[in-house]
Amino acid sequence: MINSDRIIELLASFLAVIAVLTCHEFAHAFVAYKCGDPTAKLYGRLSLNPLKHFDIIGLICFTLVGFGWAKPVPIDPSNFKRYRLGLGLTASAGIVLNYIMAFFFYPLFLLALNFMPDIPFLTSFLTYLLYLLYVYSLSFCVFNLLPFYPLDGFRIVDALNRRRGRIYRFLRQYGYYILLFLIVESFLCRALEPFISFMGYMNILGWVMDFAQKIFGFPILAVWGSAFGVPFNQIWSTLLW
């Protein structure tokens, strides 16, 4: 039997994933349109409707291991007013928006945690939802910086790199399979860790994501931690944890 806490966790997690993925893909479509490419709009992707953006495999991965992807927004770079600038801005738009979301959801989480009156179900739900919106926004931002196709990190490399050498071609051809391998390996390590303790140390993607999230999340914790009176040495200790 599922208790009320589990229902709150599942509902908050589902809504947080929807919000983070949808805003990420909308940002790509919006910036591409502003840079002169109407392709996303013509395909109905310039929308905040979550159903327009979900990729079933990416959504399953997000549910299982906490990071995944949505359906890539279609673009035609030849429509950009300035080709490389448009390509770079469009590729980085979702990452930037997710980081901004993380920056503003974190203080809302602190406010709810410390000042929201205790209303049964509602208080715990909103607090957990705001926490997950912060965590998932930061996680999705960092995850998409990985330079594997079809993630935004690869598209940023594509925009900045004029050469198409062997490394580029390798990442373009095999990046998707490398990404799936890392996600499956991470899932298996997490699933087996309670039974085989050292499996936690073999979680490649988990180590990378944990390190990167601490680095990228530190400025957010520092700014809002100071605003809420959290001692700086306590904030700094999060990098060492």
Image (cartoon, rainbow, N blue to C red):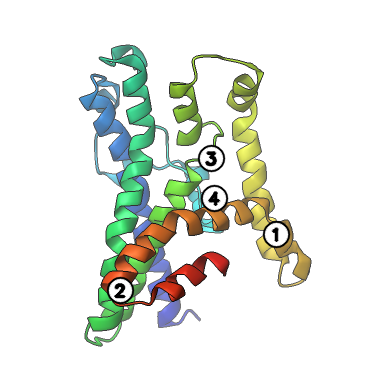
Q: Position of residue 152 (x, y in %)?
A: 45, 35
Q: CA distance from mark 1 to mark 3?
A: 20 Å
Q: What SS does tag 4 mark? A: helix
Q: Amino acid at mark 2?
A: Leu
Q: CA distance from mark 2 to mark 1?
A: 32 Å
- Residue underneath mark 4: 61
Q: Amino acid at mark 4?
A: Cys
Q: What SS does tag 1 mark? A: helix
Circle 2 or circle 4, nearest the eye: 2
Q: Quadrant of residue 132?
A: bottom left
Circle 2 Cα neighbour tier, 10 Å, few/some/many (<14 / 14–19 / ≥20)? some
Up/down of 218 relative to 114, above or below: above
Closer to the camera in the image, 165 or 5? 165
Numbered label tally: 4
Instruction: Work out which residue is located at the far top of the displayed protein and give it.
Output: 78
Tag of residue 110:
2
- Residue underneath mark 3: 146
Circle 1 or circle 3, nearest the eye: 3
Name the N-terminal-most of marks 2 and 4: 4
